[in-house]
Image (cartoon, rainbow, N blue to C red):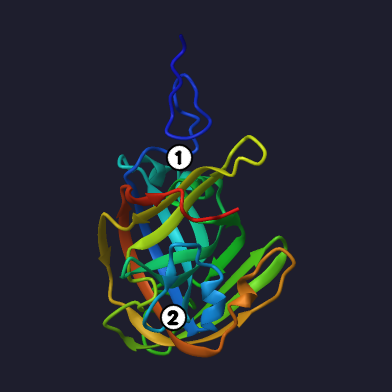
Amino acid sequence: MTSLRGYFHPKTATGASSLIPSPPWRYSGDLLTVEYRTDPARVRELLPEPLELADEDPGAVALIWADWQSCSASGEELLDPVRSQYKEAFVVVRCKYRGRTYSRCVHIWVDKDFAIARGLHQGYPKKLGSIHQTRPHPFGPAPRIEAGARFGATLAAADRRIAQAVVTLREPSRSNGFVNAHPMAHHRWLPSIEKGKGLALDELIESGAASFEGGQPWVGEAALELFEAPTEELARLEIREPIAAYYRQVGVVWDGGRLLESGTSGAE
């Protein structure tokens, strides 16, 4: 019998066509984070059971732009950049499960297919989008990482711009914000192939970085705008009060998660 190989589809005799390699997955990235407060009821409507609103600051939201290079353990993708470089923008809120506070990604857009495949595995609700952000550089007109530096960021999906921001750095910071500072509580969902049979996969999982390193965070202010679009609901998380904006370079390793419970979300 033929043995098919590959961590993810498509599986073949050699496994070379697999869309993603097996973990660990390693990331280097530049993050622009904009935190603000929205109506907690809009956060609550995105939390399936058994998740609840966080006890403290339940309406806090982080909209994060990330310019990534990623690779498998071998690092070979870094020498074939089309396989390693991608950008994403994602929305994080906080929630509570059995008394513990978690972060949760409720919307996310990426610009490469392999990033979508990793999201299916990790429980991130990834969609294709067009994501851009200003890159720092020590020479020429690009901003340096210093007080007064300004960075732009845009997000579009299905040909519509749905978010844009201008971040102005003020000073070094002790943190890169608080909304995305917890382990992630995500759901892995897959509908049954049979009509009316609900979900074939329904798992609440916890995951986070197996290891992390990062440069000096900077804090500042952001001018953030959200826009309506027929296929996106980011604008429902309306901006009621700005909190702060941050810039940081990070390195992360992801190497699996932990099952919290299964078959209880009530998702349709």
Compared across the picture, whether 256 is left or right of 220 comes to: left
Which residue corresponds to the image point at 72% horizontal and 70% vertical from the top-left? Answer: 229
- Work out whether residue 6 can be spotted: yes
Residue under pointer 2: 58
In this rendered view, identify the residue nearer to me: 195 or 37. 195
Residue under pointer 1: 20
Q: Amino acid at mark 2?
A: Pro
Q: Amino acid at mark 1?
A: Ile
Which residue is at the far right?
230
Q: Position of residue 13 (x, y in %)?
A: 47, 19
Element assignment for label 2: loop
Which residue corresponds to the image point at 61% horizontal and 40% vertical from the top-left? Answer: 197
Which residue corresponds to the image point at 51% horizontal and 61% vertical from the top-left? Answer: 88
Q: Position of residue 203 (x, y in %)?
A: 43, 49
In this rendered view, identify the residue nearer to me: 146 or 99. 99
Numbered tag placed on residue 194 in the rendering:
none
The Cα–Cα distance between marks 2 and 1, rounded to whole angstroms, is 35 Å
- Work out whether residue 89 can be spotted: no
Q: Position of residue 72 (x, y in %)?
A: 35, 43
Closer to viewer: mark 2 or mark 1: 2
Image: 126 above or below 226: above
Task: Verify CB contact (< 8 Å) between mark 2 and mark 1.
Answer: no
Counting every numbered tag in the picture gives 2
In this rendered view, identify the residue nearer to me: 50 or 102. 50
Which residue corresponds to the image point at 51% horizontal and 59% vertical from the top-left? Answer: 87
Image: 162 above or below 82: below
Q: Quick one: label 2, few (<14), some, or many (20+) residues within 10 Å?
A: many
Which residue is at the far top?
1
Name the image quarter holding residue 35.
Answer: bottom left
Name the image quarter holding residue 163.
Answer: bottom right
Element assignment for label 1: loop
N-term mark: 2 or 1: 1
